[in-house]
Image (cartoon, helix red, strand yellow):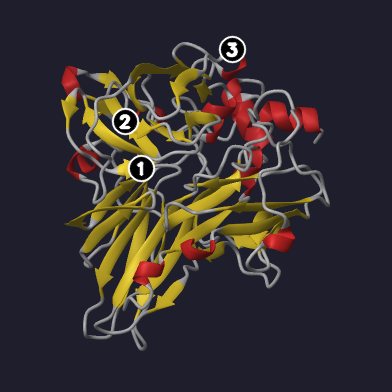
């Protein structure tokens, strides 16, 4: 694929510009940088070999774990045959090291590398991924930032990246959605080739009663750490032990419900930010979001499946926690009933453990989310990326964005370079979770607040890859 096609199909940003080098020379680094390589891999999906992409260390480890005390000292190497660049989702780097193509860093050409070096403000469960259609090809991996204050904690980390998988290319999937390919070869357009799944559920909140589009694409498989439930990953755990699930929804177009089964869990963080602990066994997880769940393992031997149920469908993926000698039983890849659409009931119950300081906002900006399956064009304030209008902010100001979803599909909205706090839902004010990605159901309104402390021009977009690629993106732009 040519660079022009690559940028156009992925909604990469703007005209290329010279990169202002913000890194410390390697000779001044406290330690040698960690190396992460964008490369090809072969995995098995439903008994078939699949050629995919990945982010691997030189020893073959998929993903990366760093300490917040060391900062982010990473060399990204492009071992692919095509240009690429990686976004460090959840981190707040200085402008120029965020990994969005041409904002301002150009794509890395095959064989090129780039050294990143910046402090880490937020330890937690994060991830890294291409900001292009390569994300669909599994160019994504966990990025765990450990907190020195938690060193020695008596808990076992279990890190899992969820994904949706198709044997079709992302270009084929996108062409099917936009109508530039025959409907019989479109990967499953909602409301047409999805066995009725396109209008699964009704938006009845706030007095509405309208059909809701839930899923755009029928995928061939849903993965947990590259594996389906036909052959799930089994994590060996200790009796009476404590497990910290670090779950990442790296899917491009699929939201999930996390089901911990008989092990009631305690949510302790979302999007890498601590929350007041909240107990339960079922939790929503939109594209781009992360959730940390603490589980207590019983004293008897056993095996406990942790499932991710596809929103609006019977398909599911997951993994198993098992003690030595615990019997691991076969788990079907489809459940008995479809999972409901994601809503905001969980969000309304969350409270930040470290909320923003109380302050009157200096800037209030409305953001209307629009679009429809017909024509497959998605907008922010009535505009696509090609004619987007930046959201202006001033350094040091408190900014509130009030998002209203006027479309009939949910959108996970992600802001780069910052973390925001959910401060109102449908006009009701409360001190909600601190996040970087928030779910926007149809016909609902969410207000988020953040402090403008990281100057630059930052992407703000829907984290449904194909909604972003067809226009649902703008920027938050610092002005003098």
Where is residue 361, by image quadrant? top left
Q: Is disc 2 surrounded by few (<14), some (14 to 19) or many (20+) residues within 10 Å?
A: many
Secondary structure at badge 3 equals helix
Q: Is residue 285 left or right of residue 350?
A: right
Kindly identify which numbered label has been placed on residue 81. Answer: none
Front residue of 441/212: it is 441
Residue contact at pointers 1 and 2, CB within 8 angstroms: yes
Pointer 2: what residue? Answer: 448
Q: CA distance from mark 1 to mark 2?
A: 9 Å
From what the image shows, is residue 240 above or below residue 250? Answer: below
The disc placed on residue 387 is 3
Which numbered disc, 3 or 2, marks the residue that appears first in the sequence? 3
Q: Which residue is mark 1?
A: 435
User: Residue 265, percent across and down?
Assistant: 23, 63
Secondary element under disc 2, as helix, strand or loop, is: strand
Going from N to C along the chain, the mark reached first, 1 or 3, is: 3
Which quadrant: the N terminus?
top right
Q: CA distance from mark 1 to mark 3?
A: 28 Å
Task: Decide: few, some or many residues near mark 3? Use Cα within 10 Å; few <14, some 14-19, many ≥20.
Answer: few
């Amino acid at each position: 694929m040519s660079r022009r096609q690559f940028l156009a199909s992925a909604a990469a940003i703007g005209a290329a510009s010279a990169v202002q080098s913000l890194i410390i020379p390697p000779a001044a680094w406290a330690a040698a940088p960690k190396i992460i390589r964008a490369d090809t891999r072969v995995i098995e999906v439903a008994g078939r070999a699949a050629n995919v992409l990945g982010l691997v260390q030189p020893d073959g480890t998929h993903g990366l774990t760093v300490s917040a005390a060391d900062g982010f000292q990473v060399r990204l190497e492009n071992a692919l045959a095509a240009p690429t660049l990686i976004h460090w989702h959840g981190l707040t780097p200085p402008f120029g090291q965020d990994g969005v193509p041409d904002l301002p860093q150009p794509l890395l050409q095959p064989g090129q590398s780039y050294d990143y070096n910046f402090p880490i403000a937020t330890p937690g469960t994060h991830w890294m991924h291409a900001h292009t259609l390569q994300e669909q090809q599994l160019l994504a991996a966990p990025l765990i930032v450990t907190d020195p204050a938690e060193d020695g904690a008596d808990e076992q980390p279990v890190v899992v990246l969820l994904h949706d998988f198709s044997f079709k290319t992302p270009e084929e999937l996108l062409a099917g959605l936009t109508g530039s390919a025959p409907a019989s070869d479109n990967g499953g357009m909602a409301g047409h080739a999805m066995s009725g799944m396109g209008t699964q559920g009704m938006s009845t909140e706030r007095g509405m009663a309208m059909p809701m589009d839930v899923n755009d694409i029928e995928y061939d498989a849903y993965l947990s750490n590259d594996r389906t439930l036909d052959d799930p990953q089994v994590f060996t755990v200790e009796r009476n032990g404590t497990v910290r699930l670090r779950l990442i929804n790296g899917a491009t177009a699929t939201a999930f419900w996390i089901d911990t089964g008989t092990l009631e869990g305690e949510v302790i963080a979302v999007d890498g930010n601590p929350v007041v602990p909240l107990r339960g066994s079922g939790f929503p997880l939109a594209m781009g979001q992360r959730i940390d769940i603490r589980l207590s393992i019983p004293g008897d031997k056993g095996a406990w499946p942790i499932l991710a149920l596809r929103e609006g469908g019977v398909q599911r993926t997951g993994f198993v926690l098992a003690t030595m000698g615990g019997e691991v039983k076969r788990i079907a890849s489809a459940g008995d009933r479809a999972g409901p659409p994601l809503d905001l009931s969980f969000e309304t119950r969350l409270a930040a453990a470290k909320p923003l300081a109380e302050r009157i906002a200096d800037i209030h900006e409305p953001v209307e989310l629009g679009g429809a399956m017909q024509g497959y064009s998605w907008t922010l304030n009535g505009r696509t990326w090609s004619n987007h209008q930046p959201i202006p902010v001033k350094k040091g100001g408190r900014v509130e964005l009030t998002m209203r979803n006027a479309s009939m599909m949910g959108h996970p909205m992600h802001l780069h370079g910052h973390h925001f706090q959910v401060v109102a839902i449908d006009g009701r004010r409360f001190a909600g979770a601190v996040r970087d990605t928030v779910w926007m159901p149809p016909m609902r309104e969410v207000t988020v607040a953040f402090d403008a402390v990281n100057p630059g021009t930052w992407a703000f977009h829907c984290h449904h890859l194909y909604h972003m690629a067809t226009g649902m993106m703008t920027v938050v732009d610092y002005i003098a």
